[in-house]
Amino acid sequence: MLKKLLDRTHRGRTVSYIMVVVLYLIIEIMIHSGNLSSLFTSLLVPVCCYIVAAIGLNLNVGVSGELNLGQAGFMSVGAFTAVSISGYLAASVSNGPVRLIIAIIAGVMISAVFGLLIGIPVLKLEGDYLAIVTLAFGQIIKSIITNMYLGFDGNGFQFSFVDNNTKLAPGGKMLLNGPMGATGTAKISTFTAGVILILVSLIIVYHLMYSRSGRAIMAARDNRIAAESVGIDISRTKMLAFVVSASLAGAAGALYGLNYSTLVPAKFDFNTSILILVYVVLGGLGNMTGTIIATIILVLLPELLRSMQDYRMLIYAVVLILIMLLTNNENMKTRLRRLKNRFSGRGRKEGEVS
Amino acid sequence: MEFFSYLINGLGLGSVYAIIALGYTMVYGIAKMLNFAHGDVIMVGAYVVFFALSSFNLPLIPGVLLSVAVCTVLGITIERLAYKPLRQASSLSVLITAIGVSYFLQNAAQLLWSSSTKVFPAVFPSGSLELGSLSISYLTLITIATCVLVMVCLTLFINRTKTGRAMRACSEDKGASTLMGINVNRIISITFAIGSGLAAIASVLLCAAYPSVYPTLGAMPGIKAFTAAVFGGIGSIPGAFLGGLLLGVIEIFAKAYISTQLSDAIVFAVLIIVLLIKPSGLLGRRIREKV
Amino acid sequence: MAEDKTPILKVEDLGIDFGGLTAVNDFNLEIFDREIVGLIGPNGAGKTTVFNMLTKVYQPSRGKILFNGEDTAKKNVVEMNRAGVARTFQNIRLFDQLSVLDNVKTGFHNRVVYSPVTAVLRLPSFRAKEKETEEQSIELLKIFGLEEEKDNLASNLPYGAQRRLEIARALATGPKLLLLDEPAAGMNPQETEELMSMIRLVRDHFKIAVLLIEHDMKLVMGICERITVLNYGMMLAEGTPEEIQANPAVIKAYLGE
């Protein structure tokens, strides 16, 4: 068993599972010993959410090779589904963790349905056109949720669109309130739930990657025509990656939504989609461990730079640009390698050769 | 009559989108990259005009020229510093870098000029032209006229000048263009310069219609214009023109006849439908992979 | 060849136009079980276009392709492969970021089948099916002398090995007809020699027919039982290697006036 976990194909996976568990234990110890500031404590659940959404997106962008600019849209679907379900069940299912699980599952299912419906037209397109359509769907989802009004009272559900025509009997409750979103949500998300969700996402994505379906997904990415020539149905394969990615975003959104008492639809806009994409690209395409590390660093970076006050987002932008230049420009890469060699004391020869 | 007035308003808005979309489409056609920072160049242009007019009391034309000059230099600088080193990198890396540039510009603006909204001065005569029962504001007329002028000049430039021909050659095949003695790096710089200059012009028209200036003002028009460029077939100059105008008209009609709140959703839905019928946009060319 | 047998591939009056330009016209071909047939002709004669029609990368404008006696008009690329036609490409198309072993495993996509749910939940059948895929893939790699390279990235292989890997991947799909597009391109004489015996071995071992495009006349004349010559999209000649070598029209097409 141990040998299997350490062999070539499993090593990467083992490292990421261990990393997540170790980080979890360290943070738990810090929380219990009172060494974690309230600011960082408040960031724990959101970081988990972004990690899960980014792992999903990496399956879509890194493994399947399709640029998706609408991941926040699926998070939004998951979030508002979960918040509504949790709000509706608040009285009947009082146990928080149970309600959280039900809400997340509901969020995943509805996001998966959206993923499937959106995937049908989207995956007919290629390259940048596919990207712009995912962007468009993200915007449409945001617009629709911004205009949804959903409430319930003793007589059942009331729903209206664009104009709020719901008239609830006394004791009724609004679940979705147009641009104001959801309010008065019971905060039932926990850090532990977030970590479990990360582990489950990793298992799903890794198990998929190292299987018949995963090989087909990567084959379709590497060479579409050759993949078809060995009998791989490209659209089904891409759809699988797209729907799993959307489902994980849904789970992430569900956890996110249930971590705040109020949630506005505008939260899940184009910028959020881009932010998650940045985590994926900086972490490395197809590299889940990298995605986790990049997400943690990039969520924390603005907070760590808090002492810089107004300059922090500017520095964040500069760091982002510099990382892209350093990791993608051959010239810079060579210079970086030389510098590394000099510091590590390894002979200059190696540096010159590269 | 109501229909015609909406149509003309739509063409006015569409003209602004078209001018911005030209920037996206030219850069895409030549550098094959989605320049997400383009919207933020518009924002910088707007601030420059704002300060030129209200702080330095410059007249409109010199103010606009100053803005065009600043944006042109900005465009070239961004390309040199951030995009040129990534010529060989994956398109995704370039995209992320462009996003970084966009964050940079927005936050630099916020730092320099604060996040509070500044009111753009009235620069165009406020009246409107009365044609029977139809009334068209001078602003709309000026906007449409500017767009047509830009389009004509650009088409002449692309088709009649040596640089324009070199640009077309680069968009077809960079390797072959280099072999023919075209300085590809120079052409890419010129493309960014033109796109950014147009963004400055668009910023004036945009702020004349919606007179508030703030650091993220370029984001939404940027996304819309990008959509317009894809709508018309990204890489195609007439496509950007057509896409921009159509997008403006659809947006105004959606607002007038269906729902203000849902107008954005409708615009994007139309885009999706068009792409499903014509996967490379209205005037785009479909490139087939050779087996 | 035995006239009483039905051919596994029968092509009738096949033709295709690209925007009004006829690329291939009136192409006829019959291939019988376990035959090795050559398709030759000068550059631009339309040989690869024929392959693209046989695999449905291009939909023919005219004519019929009967595979195993069945009309394939409604089939797409994926269905052609499932029916039993596999191919390699003139400009090698491997899955560059996958290992050599995984490249071959993708070939078993429709032969060892289990669902994504089985994979995610690691159900018992997952292990059995993966083992089966792995063993059969290794078996193929051994035949092509690539076993040592199984964990390398496909893109890191030398050119000749990449060509062999492409053939192994095509065979993994379990074809009845294998289309090889310039298998010897870029190989040195010794590699070409080895390739020739390998093609024969593949035919005997997998009991399949082979149609190959090749410019290396030594290879074509050495292993093909029949040859079809294409010129300007039209059939110029067909026959045994001896007949083709003696055909004045073929000599003229190759050597010019």
Image: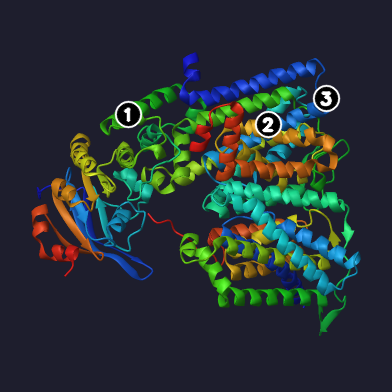
Is B13 located above or below residue A306 in the figure? Answer: below
In the figure, C90 relative to A74: above or below? Answer: below
Quarter of the image that includes the C terminus of chain B: bottom left
Q: Tell me how far mark 2 sits from mark 1, CA to CA.
A: 46 Å
- Amino acid type of the residue tagged 1 in the rendering: Glu
Question: To which residue does mark 3 refer?
Answer: A37
In whole angstroms, how far apart are the C-alphas of marks 3 and 2?
28 Å
The image quadrant that residue A322 belongs to is top right
Is label 3 in contact with label 2 (beta carbons under 8 Å)?
no
Disc 1 on helix, strand or loop? helix
Seen from the viewer's position, the closer of residues B286 and C15 is B286
Q: Mark 2 lies on which chain?
A: A
Q: Does the residue at mark 3 contact the one at mark 1 (Cβ under 8 Å)?
A: no
Q: Provide the residue designation for mark 2.
A: A104
Q: Residue furthest front?
A: A348
Rendered location of residue B124, percent (x, y) = 85, 74
User: Dot 2 surroundings within 10 Å: few (below 14), some, or many (20 or more)?
Assistant: many
- Tag 3: amino acid: Ser
Residue A35 appears anywhere in the view: yes
